[in-house]
Image (cartoon, rainbow, N blue to C red):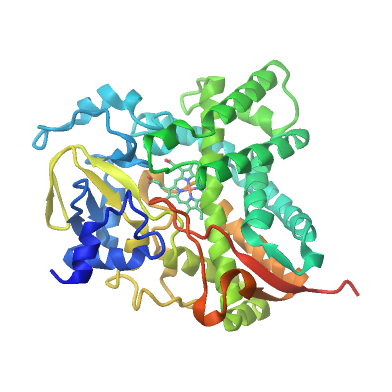
Amino acid sequence: MNDMQHEFEQYDFFRSNRFVDDPYSYFDHLRKQGAVTREPHHGIFMVTGYEEALAVYNDPENFSSCMSTSGPMAGCPIPLEGHEKDDISELIEQYRDKTALSDQLPTMDPPVHNDHRSLLMRLITPLRLKQNEEFMWQLASQQIDTFLARGTCEFIGDFAGPFAVLVISDLLGVPEQDRREFREHLLRQEQERGGSLVGGVSEKEVEHLPLAWLYERFSSYIEDRRRNPRKDVLTGLAEATFPDGSLPTPLDVARIAANLFAAGQETTVRLLSYAFQQVAEHPDIQQRLRANRNLIPDFIEECLRHESPVKGDFRLAKRPTILGGVNIPAGTFLFIANGAANRDSRMFENPDEFQIDRANAKLHVAFGRGRHTCPGAPLARAETIVALNRFFDLTRDIRVSEEAHGPRDARRYGYLPTFILRGLTHLVLEFDPVSES
Ligand code: HEM
């Protein structure tokens, strides 16, 4: 083993910050050993191959999502030892309630997942998404107006963070008068946690998720709208039923609403900030996009592939199985590394290169696949399309601030210190506002 390999083995991807700035060289190191390989610190199978990632995503029979967002990092209450050759489906059900975030959609398995996912899909209908997109155009302009004249902004705090919270607030019909409180509460919680609403690194962090606050707020909205129906989005949420026609409890609906905030905010902020970092770092790309706005959707797919905002999610093997030629004992965790699968050279030619014309970029797994595939993908894409267009309309030239990030040949960027999310903590931009006349 050479020094570099030794270093890769020595550091724990899940607990140390060693790979926060550059997870890709670690993923490459893993892939060199095999598309499915076991890391030494927790015995987790790291899935870095594209085909292998799809195989796990599409096989809920063999792989449970029960601890999808935290894996064993928030503690594992299921006594898994000694079951390597068994079917542990029953065991998982016995302990499911004790696992982290067990009431959240990403951690549910069929058949419960089917019902709750259908409920969610009734909340984000095509009509609702269309109305929400109309709102995004106005909101983006208003948000940019708050700093446009300054010619500079800290993109995440001044734009992406508030934009993403307010878009979801609008999607779910949070009343106008409450939106400021949502924005302040959720952004403050996030700052205190130093990152995402979901996918922290410790048990303590998982316990402190701001979900309780959201559960309470949405339960009371739903109770109110069931007593006094109005012509508004919340009444639609209050009246939505499970596929068998039964009415969910207010808390069931509140969980789904909270899910949308938890899963849809920080992730989208990371996509937005990477898209703007690319645009600001590469004047040629910026010029092409400004000149031909139809290229923006393809550009966004390449951003998602090249810098996947969710580095990966976990699955738990329910039975002994074989993946990519590797034996996976029952009761072991797998980490489907989206960020690695999206740079698998068997699927994407010269995967480390950012190519805005890449023909198959859309096949990335940044939004996962299978039954848990991200239902917020159209929203995240629309938010990024709207933000880029509005910035292009209102500014002439978007640049990285050298004062904040250093000169071009020696940039300094900070990345979120979590193993789940990949993305910048800050992005200071400068631009020339387009004059009114
Ligand atoms: C660029 C932004 C986003 C990325 C990269 C992303 C990524 C993902 C991934 C990888 C999953 C699958 C997790 C798994 O299989 O374990 C997922 C699920 C989910 N996402 Fe997103 N997401 C984004 C934006 C959003 C938005 C805007 C929303 C909602 C407003 C959202 C809501 C959800 C929900 C509710 C789930 C769970 C679905 C289920 O378990 O059935 N996401 N997302």
User: Could you say where residue 405 lies in the image, as x and y percent from the top left?
Assistant: 57, 70
Asked if one can make out residue 302 in the rendered structure from this viewpoint, the answer is yes
Question: Residue shown at 47%/59% (left/top)?
Answer: 415
Residue extending farthest bottom: 284
User: Could you say where residue 158 lies in the image, as x and y percent from the top left?
Assistant: 69, 56
Residue extending farthest right: 437
Q: Is residue 249 above or below residue 103?
A: above
Count how many numbered circles sit on residues in the image: 0
Question: Residue shown at 64%/21% (left/top)?
Answer: 220
Quarter placement of the N terminus? bottom left
Residue 212 is left or right of residue 148, and the answer is left
Asked if one can make out residue 127 in the rendered structure from this viewpoint, the answer is no
Question: Residue shown at 68%/40% (left/top)?
Answer: 184
Quarter of the image where one finds residue 403? bottom right
User: Could you say where residue 70 lies in the image, as x and y percent from the top left?
Assistant: 36, 41
Q: Is residue 211 above or below residue 311?
A: above
Quarter placement of the C terminus? bottom right
Residue 145 is left or right of residue 75, and the answer is right
Residue 166 is left or right of residue 416, and the answer is right
Quarter of the image where one finds residue 42? top left
Quarter of the image where one finds residue 213? top right
Residue 357 is left or right of residue 341, and the answer is right
User: Could you say where residue 131 lies in the image, as x and y percent from the top left?
Assistant: 70, 47
Q: Nearer the viewer, residue 419 or 408?
A: 408
Question: Residue shown at 15%/39% (left/top)?
Answer: 330
